[in-house]
Image (spheres, rainbow, N blue to C red):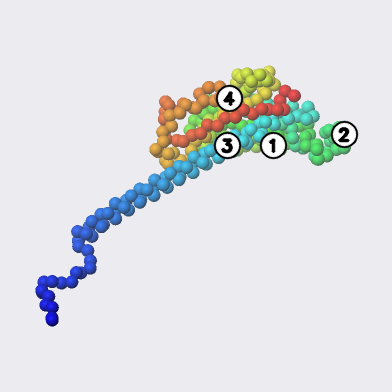
Amino acid sequence: MIEVRNAETRADQNGFTLVEMLVAMAISSIMLAVIVVTYQSQAQSHMTQQEVVDMHQNARAALDLMAREIRMAGLDPTGNAGAGIYAAGATSAYLHFSRDFTGGESDGADNDSDGTIDEADEWYDGAVGTGNEEIEYRLSNDANNDGVADGFPCSLQRRVSISTSPGSPWQNVADNIEALNFVYLDASSAVIPAPVSSANLANIRSIQVTIIARSNNPVMMRKFTDRNVYANQQGTVLLNKSASPDTVRRIELTTTIQCRNLGL
């Protein structure tokens, strides 16, 4: 038997109608937009995290360097170098100190009085004019010397000096340090008012150091508003952002350094 098909009956044809294509394009556009927004959010989150990590590492490295050097303040094996703290903060934001720990290996002197000159154990020479023996720390961009930077950029600065005249120029050892504060304590852990007088310098036994580091790129931090009040261990306010909030991320670190060579 021969089957006869209606002329209007046709096999199904592959393809999409215009409406279907428009719907598919709309869905694709929405999905693409979601992907782009998600990618931007993830990228921004990564950059923010990286900024915060860099800020933490920068601040901790700065504090570690100061702690290692300040801890040796007053090192004076011969008793002839006059090592110690020379100046302790006009406004608690400046420190000048020395330690005798180089030069004895080749100064042609018998520094330990054992009859032999220039021994390996004679690492001191009774003076503080060589190497990194005399150090100064300060905050840059701080015209009014209040321990808080007047603007950006701002850095922790260090220089190797000689008491009679400055030695090397100031060098930035940590960028984006917005505040620097020193608190000086005596043997009973009582605070010695700053600036410490010449007569009181010999009473310093430990130093509390507080630094406030900030992020270098506030654009990535626009979803964050800093309204924190930053203070040192004594409760003295160093930076008050509650009155002038911004979008900058900050971290405050503080430590107490025992100057074990002072008062010996």
Label annotation for residue 114: 2
The answer to whether 64 is drawn above or below residue 204 in the figure is below
Label 1 sits on what residue type? Answer: Asn
Dot placed on the residue nearer the N-terminal end, 2 or 1: 2
Dot placed on the residue nearer the N-terminal end, 3 or 1: 3
Distance between the alpha carbons at the discs numbered 2 and 4: 43 Å
Q: Which residue is mark 3?
A: 60
Q: Are marks 3 and 2 in contact (CB under 8 Å)?
A: no
Q: Which residue is mark 1?
A: 132
Q: Are marks 2 and 4 in contact (CB under 8 Å)?
A: no
Q: In the rendering, at what x and y percent does residue 22 appear?
A: 22, 57
For the point 39% across and 49% down, the residue is: 39
Rendered image quadrant of residue 260? top right
Report whether residue 188 is seen: yes
Mark 3 or mark 1, which is nearer to you? 3
Viewer-side residue, 205 vs 80? 205
For the point 67% across and 23% down, the residue is: 205
Q: In the rendering, at what x and y percent does residue 14 appear?
A: 23, 68
Dot placed on the residue nearer the N-terminal end, 2 or 4: 4
Q: In the rendering, at what x and y percent does residue 68 appear?
A: 66, 34
Specify whether 261 is left or right of 49.
right
Q: Residues within 10 Å of mark 2 (few under 14, many from 20)?
A: few
Specify whether 245 is left or right of 8.
right
